[in-house]
Image (cartoon, rainbow, N blue to C red):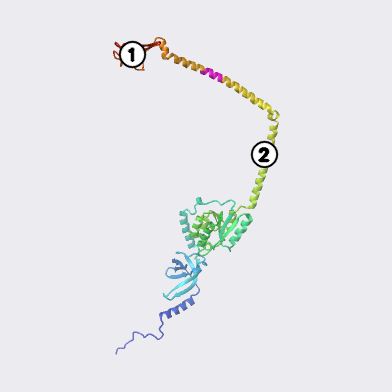
């Protein structure tokens, strides 16, 4: 006899709804994972218009959704970005409408320095190709600035060191502090805005100092962000960048017009040393005094020499000498003028003689005559164009003869 086996079970009386189950999961999960650290690579990062940042953390086999609320962003040590390896602290939270969970991040750090350095190299290569770091675009600092803007945190040690050094060197410069955060997510944008505000100050400042104390690569990362580096390069006023310690070099240092090793060094580069200026002025005053003394001595010797000269001993003698010279020149000029007039007269007489020799009147007086056709002024030089019966007029020295041509021959003179 076959035995019948039941293949289904009846639901129990305590069946839970989706909401109930999700609430239990939420309670258990959020209680157990309220304080967790997790490491992974940032991907799918999205910035919402509300200011919240949504991202995923992934490793080789899994992906974890995460969120950073707007109020938390400014307290982060570093700005998150796709491809950045990070270690995060936060708590797991369940989102019931979707039945999903996510990590709510309240702290975020880069894992080591490898990923930051790789990101730094990429940004450097990009900006270097555009000429942002070119030496040709660097501008000199004013020798004696009257107004300086300092962009930094108002509560950090950097501003204290900067002001102490500046005031010990030179007190004739007005300093305007333009406050900004210098570390954490969003600090780069805030610093860039502060630079723009410093450039708009009126009266205009002569230079801008961008300074921050030392720290790790992560602490100084805002000064490697592309947005701030471009802002430094675009500032219309010379910028001195003094970020970190002597060994720290940020992209802002490379883009600035002058790189200072530290905030203290930035003050040194911006203003002169009053003691050196005072010493230089004293040296110039001493040199001027010596030069004036020498000039005075030279002038005194010159006056003494002039006082002993003949001009001052007998002033009328100079007048007599000049008058005698003028008389001698006058005599020479008269002599030269006579010679010129005489030679000119000879040249005129010779020219007149030549004119007289070639004068038609002179030729007629020697027995020559001039013949022309009646009614014409030109003298006849050839029989060409003359016909028998033409009336001709012959000019003699004492009158004219009218004749009629009877015949012509071609007997030329000299044949």
Magenta stretch in the rendered image:
337-344
| 47 left or right of 414 in image | right
Expressed as whole percent of the image width and height from the top left, the position of residue 88 reads 49, 69
Identify the residue under disc 1.
Answer: 392
- Say which residue label 2 marks: 295
Q: Residues within 10 Å of mark 1 (few under 14, many from 20)?
A: some
Q: Residue at x 66, y 46 (%)?
A: 283
Q: Residue 227: give x, y in percent of width and height.
A: 48, 59
Mark 2 residue crowding within 10 angstroms, few (<14) / some (14–19) / many (20+): few
> In front here: 376 or 244?
376
| Chief secondary structure of the magenta portion | helix
Q: Secondary structure at mark 1?
A: strand
Please say if the residues under marks 2 and 1 sit with CB atoms less than 8 Å apart.
no
User: Left or right: where does residue 100 sit relative to residue 291?
Assistant: left
First reached walking from the N terminus: tag 2 or tag 1: 2
Residue 66 is left or right of residue 370, and the answer is right
């Amino acid at each position: 006899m076959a035995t019948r086996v039941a293949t289904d079970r009846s639901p129990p009386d305590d069946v839970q709804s989706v909401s109930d189950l999700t609430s239990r999961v939420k309670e258990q999960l959020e209680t157990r994972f309220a304080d967790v650290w997790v490491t992974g690579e940032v991907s799918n990062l999205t910035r919402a218009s509300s200011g919240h940042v949504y991202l995923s953390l992934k490793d080789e086999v899994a992906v974890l959704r995460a969120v950073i609320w707007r109020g938390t962003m400014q307290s982060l040590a570093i700005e998150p970005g796709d491809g950045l390896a990070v270690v995060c602290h936060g708590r797991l939270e369940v989102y019931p409408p979707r039945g999903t969970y996510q990590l709510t991040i309240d702290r975020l750090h880069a894992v080591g320095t490898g990923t930051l350095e790789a990101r730094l190299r990429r940004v450097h290569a990009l900006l270097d190709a555009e000429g942002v770091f070119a030496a040709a675009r660097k501008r000199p600092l004013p020798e004696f600035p009257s107004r300086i803007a300092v962009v930094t945190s108002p509560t950090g040690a950097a501003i204290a060191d900067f002001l102490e050094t500046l005031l010990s060197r030179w007190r004739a410069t007005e300093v305007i502090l333009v406050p900004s955060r210098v570390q954490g997510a969003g600090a780069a944008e805030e610093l860039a805005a502060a630079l723009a505000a410093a450039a708009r100050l009126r009266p205009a400042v002569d230079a801008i100092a961008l300074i921050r104390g030392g720290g790790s690569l992560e602490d100084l990362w805002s000064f490697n962000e592309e947005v701030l580096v471009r802002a430094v390069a675009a500032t219309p006023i010379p910028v001195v960048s003094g970020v970190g310690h002597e060994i720290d070099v940020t992209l802002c240092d490379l883009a600035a017009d002058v790189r200072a090793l530290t905030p203290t060094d930035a003050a040194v580069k911006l203003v002169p040393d009053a003691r050196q200026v005072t010493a230089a002025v004293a040296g110039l005053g001493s040199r001027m005094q010596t030069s004036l003394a020498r000039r005075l001595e030279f002038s005194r010797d010159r006056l003494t020499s002039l006082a002993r000269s003949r001009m001052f001993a007998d002033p009328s003698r100079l007048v007599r000498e000049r008058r005698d010279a003028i008389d001698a020149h006058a005599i020479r000029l008269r002599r030269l003028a006579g010679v010129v007039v005489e030679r000119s007269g000879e040249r005129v007489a010779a020219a007149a003689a030549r004119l007289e020799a070639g004068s038609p009147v002179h030729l007629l007086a020697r027995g020559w005559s001039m013949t022309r056709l009646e009614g014409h002024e030109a003298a006849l030089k050839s029989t060409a164009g003359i016909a028998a019966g033409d009336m001709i007029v012959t000019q003699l020295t004492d009158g004219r003869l009218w004749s009629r041509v009877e015949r012509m021959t071609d007997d030329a003179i000299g044949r």
